[in-house]
Image (cartoon, coloured by chain):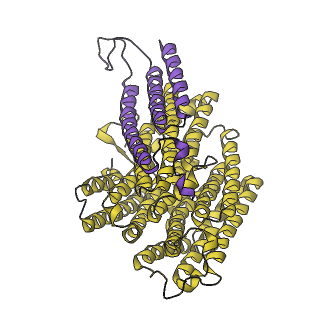
Amino acid sequence: METLMIVLSGVLVTVGTYLLLSKSLLRIIIGTSVLSHAVHILLMALGGLKRGREPLVIETEEAYVDALPQALILTAIVIGFAVTAIFLVVAYKTYEASGSSRVDRIGRADHE
Amino acid sequence: MNNMLVLPMLIPLIAAILLVFFKKQIKVQRSVSLAALLATAGVAVYILMEIEKKGILRLDFGGWHAPYGILFVADPFAMLLVAASSFVSAVCLLFAFSSIGRRLEELYVYSFILFLVAGVNGSFLTGDLFNLFVCFEVLLVASYVLLFIAGGKRQLKASVGYITLNILSSWFFLVAIGFLYGSAGTLNLAHLSERIAEAGQPPLFTSIGLLFLIVFSIKAGLLLYFWLPSSYSAPPPAIAALFGALLTKVGIYAIFRFFTLLFYHEPHITHKLIAIMAILTMAGGCLGAIAYSDIQKVISYNVVIAVGFLLAGLAVSTETALQGSIYYLIHDMIAKALLFMVGGIMVMAAGTSKMDRMSGLIGNYPVLGAVYFTVMLSLAGIPPFSGFLGKVLVGQGALASGSYILLAAAFLSSLLALYSLLRVFLSCFWGETIVSKADQLPMKKGWLVPCFILAAATLALGLGAESVAGHVTAAAKILADPQLYIDAVLGQK
């Protein structure tokens, strides 16, 4: 199960990197979100995957899921959400200012 | 347990949230933000005194002891930086009052400056890896906003690159945290240090350490500084001064903490790599500082040179060199803020940032010229100013450990930094006065006063080095002996 998740995470990294290297700002932003999801899955896999267990230590139950990675992922998701929102605002402002969402066309008029 | 420890992060945070409700009342905004930062600096100095009496302090949040809960640790190294950064940002704020303009003041710029300071102070104080990540994000998000808040094309262009790069480096940070948790099973720095020491830092940990080195190198501008000049020269001068003083320092702090507390068992791999990166950083910074004729670029590349110099101290890693680096870190916060302020004033007064279009400013603004000369001497490390002691100690440490190449590079870079700043001085302040006395922009008091304060601070730090010597020595001792830190965090109190 962990192996599968790590492979999935790798696929997401590939997709994210591809998107990140494109010239359209929107694609770059989507790329960063995909990348962050990849790392969330990686964190989940590193914490160990046990199906049907709760993240609580109960005396009668032998196995439990490590709660820490889940807390980390939750925090990381919130932060990623905020950063993506800010990035979208910047992208919109850039589009307004330069009339294009392509990275290579931003600030072209700036060079006089 | 000492609840004081949370104040350096809490005061700016609460003040920032409070200011959101006073959008139009500029006077309230100014006084509250300044009061908050001065209070933060005061608290930091007080905690520093407490540490001197009681040793390293810690605050376990919610009463959960390390390694189970998250905590703030105040060791002298962290507290010195908290005090210095709060003081410098208060002065930058003073400079912002007169230079930033009403439009930005109504766009919550003071709130974001306070958020930035909260993030910076939190990063210095935290004793937990994931908390470090969160504090980094707090300061990064604030810095994104401060970078593009002026909203010009130049700022937007710079911020697109800056944000993308920092998202990527935060991503690497998360990956590295994940790997470290997966292999060590804890995120408390002291606990991690113990576990890595028990395992003897096998190659797995060393490679995770290198991953962290990449992350913090991007933030600190160590070798991976290509983003730095364009994003530091874009924002308004007050914000550029804040960036120049604080942002890279957090990355440098993290590198110091990680490679003295966690990954110190394989110095022939990690510290050698840091040494090589430091030399390349100094070389690249010098080339940039000498090549550009844009004042803001020259100043930004001077930040890069300082990063290389600071990390040279870590690469040597003897106690003397660490002391030197700590001195220099404090000095550099003050001096770089001052340099960015003076550069910003020059650009505002001359209406251009190109060196070849400026001349004879000393005829118009003799006092500004004197301040520039002061900061130049301070950065070059001329004795009465604060840069001197740091350079001497790093030099002594490098000599003692036989790292001659590093020593040569460090001092050559100082000379070239002096040359690059002298070039600005010769071309902008000397020569024929272009603007007549009648046409010149009047020099505002609000521009000069913060410069005077920082110039006085660099002189005071140079002359009164004795007063901080005790703290710096203690800080270097703790960096050199991780066991002291571990005992303070994991020991029962």
Q: Is A38 on the left or on the right of A111, as rendered?
A: left
Q: In the rendered view, tell whether residue B226 sits above or below residue B101.
A: above
Residue B215 percent coordinates (x, y): 55, 40
Q: Residue furthest bottom?
A: B438
Residue A112 percent coordinates (x, y): 57, 59
Figure quadrant of residue B127: top left
Residue for point 40% across, 44% down: A92
Q: Is B278 on the left or on the right of A4, as rendered?
A: right
Residue B31 percent coordinates (x, y): 28, 67
Residue for point 32% across, 57% down: B107
Q: Nearer the viewer, residue B414 or B343?
A: B343
Residue for point 57% across, 64% down: B296
Q: Tag count in the figure?
A: 0
Residue B61 percent coordinates (x, y): 32, 41
Figure quadrant of residue B420: bottom right
Q: Nearer the viewer, residue B124 or B65?
A: B124
Figure quadrant of residue B216: top right
Q: Is residue B283 visible?
A: yes
Q: In the rendered view, tell whether residue A93 sits above or below residue B450.
A: above
Q: Nearer the viewer, residue B114 or A52?
A: B114
Q: In the rendered view, tell whether residue B345 sits above or below residue B265.
A: below
The colour chain A appears in is purple
Q: Nearer the viewer, residue A33 or B241?
A: A33
Q: Is residue B491 visible?
A: no
Chain that appears yellow: B
